[in-house]
Amino acid sequence: MAQSPDKKTDELVFLALGGLGEIGMNVYLYGLGPVQNRQWLMVDLGITFPGPTEPGVDIVLPDLRFITAEKASLAGLVVTHAHEDHIGAIIELWPQLEVPIYATPFTMGMLRAKLSEFGGRLKPALREIPLGGRFDAGPFNVEFITMTHSIPETSGLAIRTPAGTIFHTSDWKLDPEPVLGKPIDPEKLKSLGREGVDVLVCDSTNVLRDGVSPSETEVANSLAAIIKKAPHRVAVTSFASNVGRVLAVARAAHAAGRHLVIAGRSLHRVIEVGIDTGHLPPDFKYLDQEEYGYLERSQIVVLLTGSQGEPRAALSRAADGEHPDIKFSKGDLVIYSSRNIPGNEKAIGRVQNALARLGCEILTDSEDLVHVTGHPRRGELRQMYEWIEPKALVPMHGEARHLRAHARYAAECGIKNVIVPEDGAIVRLAPGKPTIIDDAPVGRLYRDGRLVVPGDTGPVRERRKLSAVGIAVASFAMTPRGEQVSDVMAILDGIPHTTRDGDSMEDVVLDAVEGTIESIPKARRKNHELVRDAVYRAVRAAIYEEWGKRPIVKIMLHVVE
Ligand SMILES: [Zn+2]
Ligand SMILES: [Zn+2]
């Protein structure tokens, strides 16, 4: 144990640096000890994808400055499962933390694969814990409890501390018949409940939906029936990490007497890790994409990446006729065994339109049971509450509307103490009722090309403005005495070229600059600051007059002898 806590001031606190107020970028912290001397445990370190107001960036990362400042008291990073929203920021941000990473074999296998591909010289201490294993990290005793979700080995965490016990569910659903692994063990959860759980920290993603979600096995059966009836090629696109779905598609292909072809780097990586960790049979049979062209149309099931319309993924390239191996033609069936992640609808629609032009049939989860969620609906949440009987509940993994709906639902189900913190709120979980006691700095960072840049003060703010109003740059030279010694030059980007009267917008800018300089008495033109400022305001006003919008304006006044 890292410390012998003073019982009177020993608090158990919780905060999220991401994941409360958005679905994605999950980073949760548990802290134990008096306020000046807390030990911390991090759960998950994920990314999210940029929205329409974050132009040009590749991924969004959490701002860890709060815990980086306390890294000497950070006991470890526990990773619950290998989805990008839980694991995706490790390679980028682990160097700030340098803590041991704890995970089960499949999750660790996925992390190792990514480290060897993208991690350069990073050498984190990787502590592989068996499924259901239990270990100490600082003052936290952590037990992995295997859940069902949409990727193997997803684990909830029973976190036992001298100040109280938490059950952190991670992402989960109740799947009575998973394609891979075992169903959730109710006895395990009931016994944890009898032992006493102070706070249930629980997935909120599907709280707006009633009932219970179908099982992965029902989806597998439905896919098998659809593939059996298909006359020509069948393509299935899915989230690469759903190893159970990969296995279901493979079985459906073989049952229909077809070959399984795999296309997409991330699918190959997942299949390798799946075989290494025993989730897929060692003789898992599939063909590489190069063989596609040699097979009869009726012999093919191709599983490929690109369900979210990613332009470089195999499906998009095939739909555009640009894939070296995968081609589609009239009558082929393309199954979207996935859901549309909000924000991706346009990109997905673009690919589906391209497929439709080729004459492909498209089948999505709105027409048939070809996908199922990995998150609990209300019926499943209620079952969890009954097993765990927590004294208090903190909703996680949701946007504001999900978190609040989850809080109301939990209260309706009889949980007395429910609190809804968002990212950055420090919640005292114990002793006493959960209470928000403080807040921590939080934010978003962007991976922008080769660099990681800040969200609030970085280039994306300017880029957002540029994308809406464009930029006008005007440049001219003056002597120190204020004589203009060059022509004015102007560059307009993202601004209409002509006015309503058909005049050139560039001329509008040039006239505004010239006119303004002339209007300043000669004696005052040696005050370059004054000239630049007046020209700036004149250019903005002149463009606004014609266009009705104010662009970004930059004036470059060169001083030459
Ligand atoms: Zn998640
Ligand atoms: Zn997940």
Image (spheres, helix red, strand yellow):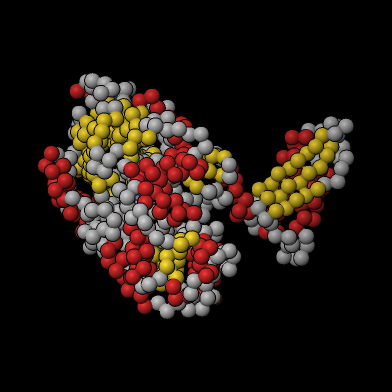
Left or right, 555 with respect to 267, comes to right
Residue 10 to residue 80: above or below: above
Residue 99 to residue 337: above or below: above
Q: Position of residue 90 (x, y in %)?
A: 43, 39
Query: Residue at coordinates 13% horizontally, 43% vertically from top-left?
Result: 191
Left or right, 501 with respect to 298, comes to right
Left or right, 537 with respect to 350, comes to right
Residue lying at the far left of the rendered structure: 194
Quadrant hosting residue 535: top right
The residue nearer to you, when weighing 168 against 522, is 168
Q: Position of residue 400 (x, y in %)?
A: 35, 50
Query: Residue at coordinates 55% horizontally, 65% vertically from top-left?
Result: 325
Residue 318 to residue 417: above or below: below
Position of the N terminus, as image quadrant, is: top left
Query: Residue at coordinates 14% horizontally, 39% vertically from top-left?
Result: 196
Total number of numbered discs in the rendering: 0
Q: Position of residue 269 (x, y in %)?
A: 44, 51
Query: Residue at coordinates 54% horizontally, 59% vertically from top-left?
Result: 311
The residue nearer to you, when weighing 513 against 221, is 221
Position of the C terminus, as image quadrant, is: top right
Note whether residue 489 is visible. yes
Quadrant hosting residue 163: top left
Q: Position of residue 293 (x, y in %)?
A: 53, 69
